[in-house]
Amino acid sequence: MRTLFKAFFILAVGVVLLSVIGGFSLAHHVFSEPGLHIVVNGDEWTDPDVGDFIGVMIGLGVTGLVLFIVLPLVLLFAVGLPLLIVGGVIGFLMLLFCGVGAVVFSPAFLVILVLWLLLRRPKARATAPAPRP
């Protein structure tokens, strides 16, 4: 099913690209051929009407720029960067508190270490097995 959707998506993108290429080729012919007249739905498409087309293309270009460049950067810096900063500060505070705890409790750690060394059971020495005759 995924392959079918991928194929339809690629086909749709191809149709859109072909229509854009066709529109630009029509616009090119309107400007280059003096005797060419394009009629769409009974309205003649002439030079004054192309201004709207150029405006639409500029608007679509700006919209694409905003959607594909500005929006990801805003999301990255407005959401991702503050989360990274907060995570770094929390990590630094955890390291700081662990360090302070180690310094504050170091006398207790030394007493516990000395008691453990003094009160532990000595290791039993392994005796070698008796040699066989």
Image (cartoon, grey):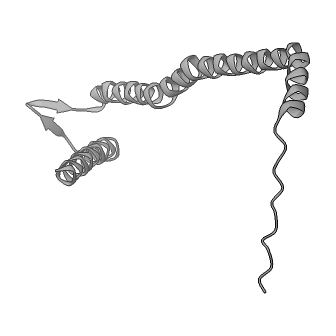
- Residue 7 point in image, percent of width and height: 21, 53
Q: Residue furthest bottom?
A: 133
Horizontal side of 100 relative to 45 (left or right) equals right
Q: Is residue 126 above or below residue 1?
A: below
Q: How many numbered marks have been drawn onto this rendered protein structure? A: 0
Q: Nearer the viewer, residue 31 or 113?
A: 113
- Residue 125 point in image, percent of width and height: 84, 55
- Residue 12 point in image, percent of width and height: 21, 46
Q: Is residue 40 above or below residue 90?
A: below
At horizontal 27% and vertical 27% (from top left) the residue drawn is 49
Q: Nearer the viewer, residue 36 or 58?
A: 58
Horizontal side of 21 relative to 44 (left or right) equals right
Q: Is residue 92 above or below residue 65?
A: above
Q: Nearer the viewer, residue 50 or 120?
A: 120
- Residue 13 point in image, percent of width and height: 27, 46
Quadrant of the image containing the C terminus: bottom right
Q: Nearer the viewer, residue 88 or 122?
A: 122
